[in-house]
Amino acid sequence: MVKNTQTPPLDDSDVALGEASTRLNSALDLLDTCTSALLQRMKGAREAGEVDEDRARLAAELDAAQARADALEEAAREAGAALDAAIDEVRSALGEV
């Protein structure tokens, strides 16, 4: 018995199925490419948002630190003035003025 090693000829439905399969694969590749690009843009936007949040947090911390520095500077001026007044009183009491 001799086996038939020839491939049977393709009919129209086989050709149509092959073309549809090719179009489907192309569409899936395009979808994958677009999805990857969208994910990259979303990641970039999220990172940009995180940078903005960090910048806002750091600005608030800087404002708070500046307010503390201003308060310390004012307290130092007041302490210096009080110390000068105390020195003047001590000198006056000792009769050095």
Image: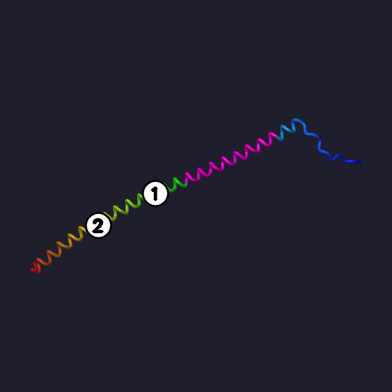
Residue pictured at 23% horizontal, 56% vertical: 74
Q: Is residue 49 left or right of residue 34?
A: left
At x 65%, y 38%, the residue is: 25
Kind of element beneath mark 2:
helix
Q: Mark 1, mark 2: which one is toward the viewer?
A: 1
In the image, residue 94 above or below residue 75? below
Amino acid carrying mark 2 in the image = Glu
Percent position of residue 55, x then y? 39, 49
Which numbered disc flags the more N-terminal residue, 1 or 2? Answer: 1
Indicate which disc residue 73 carries. 2
Q: x, y (%) of residue 56?
A: 38, 48
Apparent side of residue 41 relative to residue 6 in the rendered image (left or right): left
Residue 93 vs residue 47: left or right?
left
Name the chief secondary structure element in magenta.
helix
Query: Magenta includes 33?
Result: yes
User: Foreground: 38 or 75?
Assistant: 38
The colouring scheme, among rainbow, by chain, secondary structure or one colour, is rainbow
Residue 29 x, y percent position in the rendering: 62, 40
Mark 1 to mark 2: distance in Å? 26 Å
Quarter of the figure that contains the C terminus = bottom left
Mark 1, residue position: 55
Magenta range is: 19-46
47 or 72, which lies in front? Answer: 47
